[in-house]
Image: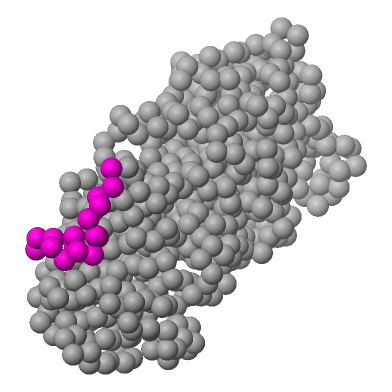
Amino acid sequence: MIRTSLLLAALTGSLLAADNRLGPLKDLDGYFPFNPPNSLSQWDQRREEVRQRILVSQGLWPMPTKTDLKVVRHGRIEGDGYAVEKVYFQSAPGFFVTGNLWMPKSVKGKIPCVLFAHGHWQDARLSLNDEDKVRAEIAIGAERFEQGGRSIFQSLCVQLARMGCAVWQWDMLSDSDSIQIPREVVHRFATQRPEMNTLENWGLYSPQAEAHLQSIMGLQTWNAIRGLDFVLSLPEVDPKRIAITGASGGGTQTMLLAAIDDRIALSFPCVMVSTSMQGGCTCENASLLRIGTGNVEFAALFAPKPQGMNSANDWTREMATKGFPELQSLYALHGAKDKVMLLRGEHFLHNYNAVTRSAFYSFLNTHFKLGQKNPVIERDHVPLSREQLSVWDKDHPAPKAADPDFERQLLSYFTHDSQSRLQNSDESVLRAGVQTVLGRRYEEAGEGSWLLNQKEDKGDHLLMTGLLRNDTHNEECRMLWLYPKSWKGRVVIWLEDQGQNGFDAAKAKPLLDQGIAVGLPTLLMQERPLNERTATVKSPREFAGYTHGYNHSLFAKRVHDVLSVLNFVRQGKVKGMGAASWVGLLAQGEQTGPIATAVRALAPEAIDAAAIHTHGFRFSALLDWRHPSFTAGGAKYNDLPGMLALAKGRPLHLKGEGKDNTEDPVVWLAKAKP
């Protein structure tokens, strides 16, 4: 028996300090630069990757079933140059989206439409500012009128209707007439709810919800998509002139919808496009969303279509020098540099004030050819009351408010709908979803090098320890190699739950006797106790999206280690060994069995045979989002069986899934046909 822990001691410390995964976790207050591509072909590929990441993170890959909206319009009011109606519809069965539809008083022909996402102004659509606040805004030049200035939301809608546009202004979840999920859940969630953390009928923010990519942000993105469906069903609306705008959280919604839905023709996200803070609310974060990307790149996805934005004395204050020049470069690459604009407003606080609104009107007027004189300046109006705009009344009763059973039922509906959609989708949809969840394709494994630390002659084989460095991704993995002197070009990558610590090399004898080399990596942080909870970003709120929205899971990072080893073996990167002609994979541990399953799903053609014991593992069975095997989205794509299916037909010795193969897995691999 050969114990290897002493041989590994020299490889700890400074050598592993180069692994960038050992540094602090990234969070929403990090730095998120956008690096413009060198060519449009390069950008086309990157654009699709980021769009897919957004869709997956929002639970929209594949897209849910679009059920009948069951639109209700009522309570028309006519004002000076505009008309407004109360509207509600169901984005999913029983899930109500509420808002107001503003129109020109007289509609002639097809008219443009603006979707207006309001962001974090509580009860934005229905609330009115008091007189003192409005006067203070007027005093600093942020507003112009004592009446119209009482509601920035009504002001924008009225002005656009007077300019000949339709406007759909809807409620964020928990605001105004959107009452089914309470504000404490939507915006203020802080502590895990034991009653919602269950294997069935779970609630938002639970490990189950995260494993199925169900989030407040995803629900709001879905509501935005269904709102676009609604306005495009209106006979008056010109489908070629659809715009979206919003500030703060509404700016986040604007960026995302514009990025993923090609039906949007003009976008104007306010005080949110930034290389700095990415959005602090639970409704602006989702697991997987900003890993390797950020808000400026989200805005970039809209190029080369017209897009405006502004800066203020907030996290956007450096946009003119960090972010916007890069956006201009991308637009210039498309030959459309004049289609992106930044309104400098660092002397204002976080806003969608009259100055910014005027910039939006003028931008819209130019690109939608509305025939107004630029710059477009608002006219005053008399704001409507809460009662005049609220959609619920005795003839249109509101649904039950803050109903936890509804929350559970809604997530159950989306879970079953997703399963049905996947069942009827091409395998490419499943594969793309799994690749995004795991964060790396085999083709992206990267280039690297091998650093030999120690070599011992063991008679019929060499024992080598060293370091595989992935130079592309700045990652490192300690390795133990058992290299038979009569090597036949075959390699087995052997995974243990605690890496090389205490590994008994005698167990590999059947492989060595057949001239098969064995490579045993110590995956990231395998030196820790087996089930020690994983690290999270510094936040008092128990929301996985704050960590997993910016960082790969530990499970995914360990998968990346195995991909690196596999790639290096296939390319002959290990000194003293040529490129392997045949590669096997062995993983019998409770943690490494699922890891090997994931690797095999990502690289089915690169693994000639695998012996895996899954121990019946399911991502959906984890009730702690800090478990070392927790992976956001892990259950979304048919869980572990979905990953197994992606390598269907490849030689596999499988245990833990019923009808176990009873042959010794090491002997089975030793006998596997080259």
| Farthest right residue in view | 132
Q: Which residues are magenta?
A: 659-674
**Left or right of residue 381: residue 72:** left
The answer to which of 273 and 436 lies nearer the viewer is 436
Question: Looking at the picture, how far across and down is residue 390, in whole percent?
Answer: 73, 20
Residue 656 versus residue 264 in the image, above or below: below
Q: Residue at x 54, y 75 (%)?
A: 23
Magenta-drawn stretch contains 233: no
Question: Looking at the picture, how far across and down is residue 199, in whole percent?
Answer: 55, 38
Color style of the picture: one colour
Using the rendered image of the protein, determine whether residue 447 is visible from the camera's viewpoint: no
Q: Residue at x 18, y 76 (%)?
A: 512
Residue 364 versus residue 395 in the image, above or below: below
Q: Disc count in the image?
A: 0
**Left or right of residue 398: residue 23:** left
**Left or right of residue 40: residue 419:** right
Q: Residue at x 48, y 72 (%)?
A: 525
Magenta-drawn stretch contains 671: yes
Using the rendered image of the protein, determine whether residue 150 is visible from the camera's viewpoint: yes
Question: Looking at the picture, how far across and down is residue 72, in whole percent?
Answer: 59, 13
The answer to which of 586 and 321 lies nearer the viewer is 586
Question: Looking at the picture, how far across and down is residue 292, in whole percent?
Answer: 45, 61
The answer to which of 666 and 106 lies nearer the viewer is 666
Q: Residue at x 57, y 57 (%)?
A: 626
Quarter of the image containing the C terminus? bottom left
Quarter of the image containing the N terminus? bottom left
The answer to which of 500 and 319 lies nearer the viewer is 500
Examine the image and state in which quarter residue 400 appears: top right
**Left or right of residue 451: residue 235:** right
| Farthest top residue in view | 395
